[in-house]
Image (cartoon, rainbow, N blue to C red):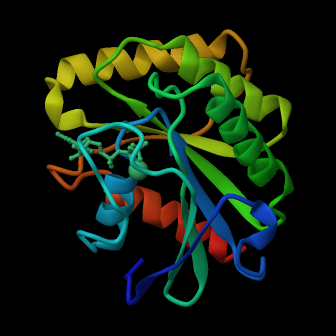
Amino acid sequence: MVIKSAEYLISNVDWQKCPVADKPEYAFIGRSNVGKSSLINLLTSREKLAKTSGTPGKTQLINHFLINNQWYLVDLPGYGFAKVSQGQRKAWERMIEDYLRKRPNLMNVFVLVDSRHTPQKLDIDFINQLGEWNIPFQIVFTKADKNTQLETSRNTKAFLNKLRETWQFLPASYVTSTVKKSGRDQILAFIEEMNAR
Ligand code: GTP
Ligand code: MG
């Protein structure tokens, strides 16, 4: 898919204030600092479209972007950020749960997982929760440039194996690096295919 235009639209805490749900929508979620905003910039080839930061907790709201005047891309805040109060965490969970379960045009959620680590309970639990809510998702392993190929392959396999304990069929997964600019075409091809349905 050629990205002809990519514009920031609006940030919300409330799913009901999100843009009119008249276009297919794709959301990016995952642990704080996993690389969601960076991946969005890679996908759109716009270096500064989504705000990125070395400090976890940068993205705090539901951020809508309009791509090619045809589909919405959504940058979500990360989960598992240690430095937040119980109250903030509950508010976050409510905001995300409402958005994920109620947004009618949500086509797919890309769950980002750091390829440097062995399977983390937090990610597995989040994915299993998506399953209970019947929300379609795929997995994006990030920061592949930080490992050797062998380490990446080991970690991604271990993660998918862990999912097999609860899932009979595994969703598609991608390996990405914003440094090597890899994984972009595969994700965009899937979105293009979904948009055509
Ligand atoms: P929050 O909004 O805080 O939840 O973080 P996020 O998931 O949006 O992460 P963000 O894109 O802000 O990236 C966090 C840090 O990881 C930044 O310092 C990025 O430069 C770095 N980063 C993201 N993707 C990659 C990657 O593929 N390779 C490398 N080496 N660094 C990456
Ligand atoms: Mg972010």
Q: Quadrant of residue 154?
A: top left
Image location (x, y in percent) of residue 180: 15, 50
Q: Could you tell me which residue is drawn at 33 percent across and 27 percent down?
A: 115
Callout count: 0
- Position of the N terminus by quadrant: bottom left
Q: Nearer the viewer, residue 130 or 172?
A: 130
Task: From the viewer's perspective, tell me whether residue 105 is left or right of residue 192.
Answer: right
Q: Is residue 121 above or below residue 108?
A: above
Q: Quadrant of residue 167?
A: top right
Q: Nearer the viewer, residue 124 or 169?
A: 124
Q: Could you tell me which residue is drawn at 72 percent across and 14 percent down?
A: 166
Q: Is residue 15 visible?
A: yes
Image location (x, y in percent) of residue 97: 77, 42
Q: Quadrant of residue 9?
A: bottom right
Q: Is residue 10 above or below residue 167?
A: below
Q: Could you tell me which residue is drawn at 77 percent across and 82 percent down?
A: 22
- Position of the C terminus by quadrant: bottom right
Whereabouts is ligand 1, in terms of quadrant? top left
Q: Is residue 13 above or below residue 148?
A: below
Task: From the viewer's perspective, tell me whether residue 88 is left or right of residue 29.
Answer: right
Task: From the viewer's perspective, tell me whether residue 28 is left or right of residue 113.
Answer: right
Q: Is residue 170 visible?
A: no
Q: Could you tell me which residue is drawn at 69 percent across and 73 percent down?
A: 24
Image location (x, y in percent) of residue 33: 36, 37
